[in-house]
């Protein structure tokens, strides 16, 4: 099996325990610190464990290097681990003031600060609208451009402050989520090419699965979930997949109480014909 987002190895450990010594578990991650944590977590499994620092968009090339042509299971749990959100080098959180970076893969060149300080106002507004689905995108972009005329926006705190300022309405109702949530999501998607990577994984997945093999994707926002849904449906129409989840599976209230981030998780599973 391939865990395309091995992270801390939590899922891999549970699946790996069910694989015997003949089984192979391949874990991919773009973040070397995630791989270090996964290595410890998976040390006692009896199956063969191969951890590779790689973008899951390149899953086919990685498997071919390992002489694995087909697999029985592909799992992806998209997005970020809590450890990454808290990592003050990654600059992903507005809860703390961090350098405005957002690269999960340190070898990428463009940071969120580069985008925020260099894109023109229209391009900023377009990306906040397209990837953050924030209807106030034009106003947010205007505030960003106004602020950067005085100072470079180089921390998550500065950006969160500008966005909050753009969305503040005197006497207005407080939103359930932090006002900067959508802008941060948009920048993270663009910095890490998240939708392109997912598209590549979904395309490769159908070719790599053995008959009766499974692909299971957990996503955390509607842009990703929509892509997974459309891809699985198209593959069903083409006779390649059977859908095991017509509607996505979601966490129950007990799980959400134990892990707040699970509230937006959606799991879809398909089986290869
Ligand atoms: C939500 S965490 C996965 C947690 C994991 N399921 C566990 O049980 O510990 C997502 C992981 O995917 C990684 N990741 C995100 N985008 C990736 C990509 N395009 N290719 C490979 N790994 C990626 C992140 O670095 C992070 O470690």
Image: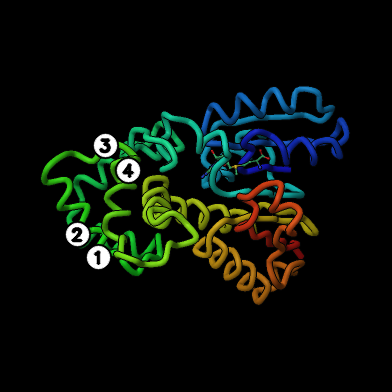
Q: Note whether ligand 1 is within 8 Å of mark 2.
A: no
**Separation of marks 1 and 4 at Cα, in angstroms:** 18 Å
Q: Residues within 10 Å of mark 3 (few under 14, many from 20)?
A: many
Q: Which mark is residue 212?
A: none
Which callout, 4 or 3, points to the residue nearer the camera?
3
Per the image, the residue denoted by label 4 is 112
Identified at 79% across, 41% down, the residue is 15
Q: Residue 12's x, y, as percent? A: 73, 38
**Separation of marks 1 and 3 at Cα, in angstroms:** 21 Å
Q: Residue 18's x, y, as percent? A: 86, 39
* C-beta proximity under 8 Å, tags 1 and 2: yes
Colour setting:
rainbow
In front here: 134 or 195? Answer: 134
In front here: 138 or 65? Answer: 138
Q: Residues within 10 Å of mark 4 (few under 14, many from 20)?
A: many
Q: Note whether ligand 1 is within 8 Å of mark 1.
A: no
Per the image, the residue denoted by label 3 is 154
> Please, which residue is most extreme toward the bottom here?
237
* C-beta proximity under 8 Å, tags 1 and 3: no
């Amino acid at each position: 099996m391939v865990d395309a987002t091995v992270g801390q190895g939590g899922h891999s450990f549970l699946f790996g325990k069910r694989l015997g010594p003949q089984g192979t578990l391949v874990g991919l991650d773009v973040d070397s610190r995630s791989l270090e944590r996964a290595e410890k977590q998976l040390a006692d499994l009896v199956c063969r464990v191969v951890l590779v620092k790689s973008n899951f968009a390149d899953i086919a090339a990685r498997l071919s290097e390992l002489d694995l042509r087909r697999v029985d299971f592909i799992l992806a749990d998209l997005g970020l681990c809590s450890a990454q959100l808290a990592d003050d080098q990654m600059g992903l959180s507005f809860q703390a003031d961090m350098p405005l970076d957002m690269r999960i893969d340190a070898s990428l060149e463009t940071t969120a600060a580069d985008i925020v300080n260099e894109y023109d106002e229209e391009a900023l507004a377009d990306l906040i609208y397209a990837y953050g689905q924030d209807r106030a995108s034009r106003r947010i972009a205007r505030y960003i451009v106004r602020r950067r005329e005085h100072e470079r926006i180089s921390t998550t705190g500065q950006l969160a402050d500008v966005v909050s300022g753009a969305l503040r309405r005197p006497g207005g109702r407080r939103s359930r989520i932090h006002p900067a949530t959508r802008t941060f999501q948009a920048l993270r998607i663009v910095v890490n090419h998240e939708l392109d990577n997912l598209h590549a994984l979904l395309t490769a997945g159908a070719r790599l699965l053995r008959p009766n093999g499974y692909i299971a994707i957990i996503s955390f926002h509607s842009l990703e979930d929509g892509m997974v849904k459309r891809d699985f449906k198209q593959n069903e129409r083409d006779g390649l997949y059977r859908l095991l989840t017509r509607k996505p599976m979601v966490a129950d209230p007990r799980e959400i109480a134990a892990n707040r981030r699970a509230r937006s998780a959606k799991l879809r599973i398909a089986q290869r014909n």
